[in-house]
Amino acid sequence: MTTTPHIRPEVAAEIPAVPLTTEGYSVLHQMMRVRRPAWRALPDAEKVAIAKEASDALAAMEKSSAGPSALFSLIGHKGDLMLIHFRESFADLNQAELRLANLRLSDYLEPTTSYLSIIELGLYESTVKIYKALTERGIEPNSEEWKREIADTLARQKEAMRPRLYPEIPPHRYACFYPMDRRRGEDKNWYTLPIEERARQMYEHGMVGRRYAGEVKQIITGSIGFDDWEWGVDLFAEDPLVFKKLIYEMRFDHVSAVYALFGQFYVGVRVPAAKLEDLLNGNLPH
Ligand code: 76R
């Protein structure tokens, strides 16, 4: 008879594989190129008026109560500007995008790429705990009671994590953004690992990250179903060298060494919206 309180194998196999996540701001990254020949051809007074209209609109967005936006000057050929928008909903992100598209400045900008995602806190540790506790109480996965317990856990986590789910855009001078996937290869497949093993690897990942706590601010956004990669990673720091050190060290984490696949990296310098005109005219504000 299997009346032990331990998880019976046939029940354990039924524990859902997906970790619980809790979500916050909707996030849009917009990368743009300035159409320099067209911009340069404008009379000075037009440039001033167009830049002022855009910088006023962006300044309002920087401190919008619907969620903040921030402007960065991108380094390299992948674009000139990067805008990061945090909003309450996808509709609000779309509104921000439309607002910008309606500025006269947008005649002088071309999108090079964009990325749509949502701030996500993965809850591997509490997921394994709650799944096990519920299973031990004999609650069927996905039954009404199971769903109610999970909803309660998520509501509590969401409340406790509110500041991390709805953060400011960190004010640091440099930002580094890149999308990434977890490998789904024939041989190495993150999604077929048991949840306990994924939880263990994510815990190790978090421990490495924590050592950089004072130097870098990281924001993880989830984009499964929204964009071409699975996650977007934003890092913010005063010294860009920290990006290299942190990401290099993480490459040796089991979870990165075996399962991480990366998209393009974008590195930018923060520019206050009020200084947009300087930037358009070739002067990076200090
Ligand atoms: O959010 C937390 O602080 C809890 C622990 C944590 C989670 C759940 C955490 C900590 N991360 C989590 C999730 Mn992370 N992270 C990356 C990258 O370059 C690479 O190899 C990977 C890119 C960096 C640099 C980074 C930094 N993290 C995730 C996820 C979701 C995966 C999932 O759920 O399956 C991804 C894709 C990802 C990737 N991470 C930290 C950091 C840092 C610096 C920390 C510590 C933060 C702190 O404690 O202050």
Image (cartoon, rainbow, N blue to C red):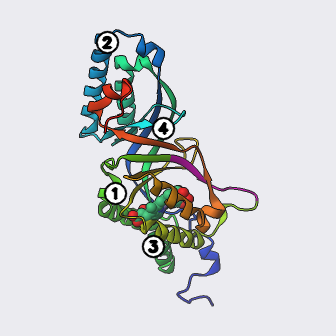
Q: Secondary structure at mark 4?
A: loop
Q: Identify the residue under disc 1.
A: 164
Mark earlier in primary sequence (4, 3)? 4
The residue carrying mark 1 has its beta carbon less than 8 Å from ligand 1: yes
The amino acid at mark 2 is: Asp
Q: Identify the residue under disc 4.
A: 75
Mark earlier in primary sequence (1, 3)? 3
Do residues under tags 1 and 2 come within 8 Å of each other at their CB atoms? no
The residue carrying mark 3 has its beta carbon less than 8 Å from ligand 1: no
Viewer-nearest of labels 4 and 3?
Answer: 4
C-alpha gap between disc 4 and disc 3:
45 Å
Identify the mark at residue 222; answer none if there is no mark: none
Q: Identify the residue under disc 2.
A: 44
Specify whether residue 252 is painted magenta: no
The amino acid at mark 3 is: Ile
Answer whether residue 148 is visible to the viewer in this image.
no
Mark earlier in primary sequence (4, 1)? 4
Q: Secondary structure at mark 3?
A: helix
Do residues under tags 1 and 3 come within 8 Å of each other at their CB atoms? no
Which of these two is toward me, 82 or 3? Answer: 82
The amino acid at mark 1 is: Arg
The magenta span reads 178-186
How far across and down, in percent of the image, does residue 261 sit? 63, 53
Q: Identify the residue under disc 3.
A: 130
